[in-house]
Image: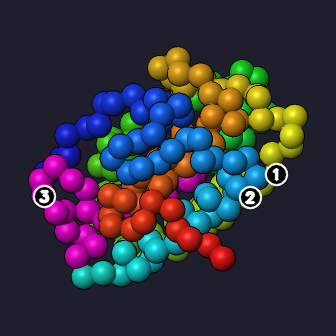
Amino acid sequence: MAIEPDTKDWTWVMSRRCTDCGFDPSTVDRDEVGDRIASSADGWASILSGPDSTQRPNDSTWSPLEYGCHIRDVHRIMAQRLELILTTEPAEFANWDQDETAVADGYRTQDPTVVAGEIADAAARFAAAYDAVADDQWDRRGLRSNGSSFTVDTFAVYALHDLEHHRVDVGLPARSPRP
């Protein structure tokens, strides 16, 4: 059964706390962005190795596996978009329909163990890309297909919300504690 597409414009999370997951954009520090992206992968291998990882909790919610595939793709897409912002100004992002991707790429039938490894790899690459952002690049601009405008700075906030929000969706803490 197809999930009802999420058509909300989530760009408001760049300026306001998310009451669903607790994400607070004021807690995002440029010096911690790479670490927060990397730590967003923590716990997914455990979630995806669970006996219910392929089961939807209800007809309107993705399974942990589907969320995992989405998170893997968020890391990949966001890393590509960051690269575009850093190399083209103003960068323009092609539309990405996450619900269409879930169906077209068969999220429900992917191997949870493979997906867990792919999340870790994609998170590491995206984190490294943010770690390499130079001080004079944080104000570079990108535009989403609907006209929403981002800087490298606000794009980090937007991406972190997505990564941390979906951790909550599968029962993980929003932010993974790192030593």
Q: Residue at x 41, y 80 (%)?
A: 46
Q: Residue at x 59, y 41 (%)?
A: 26
Q: Earlier in the sequence, mark 3 or mark 1?
A: 3
Magenta span of residues: 52-78
Q: Which residue is mark 2?
A: 128
Q: Contact (CB < 8 A) between labels 1 and 2?
A: yes
Gap between marks 3 and 1 measured at Cα: 41 Å
Q: Residue at x 69, y 48 (%)?
A: 29
Tag 1: amino acid: Ala
Between 104 and 57, the one lying in front of the other is 57
Q: Which residue is mark 3?
A: 58
State the image coordinates of residue 13 (x, y, percent, origin top left): 47, 35
Q: Is residue 38 above or below residue 149?
A: below
Gap between marks 2 and 3 measured at Cα: 36 Å
Whether residue 120 is visible to the viewer of this picture, yes or no, is: no
Q: Earlier in the sequence, mark 2 or mark 3?
A: 3
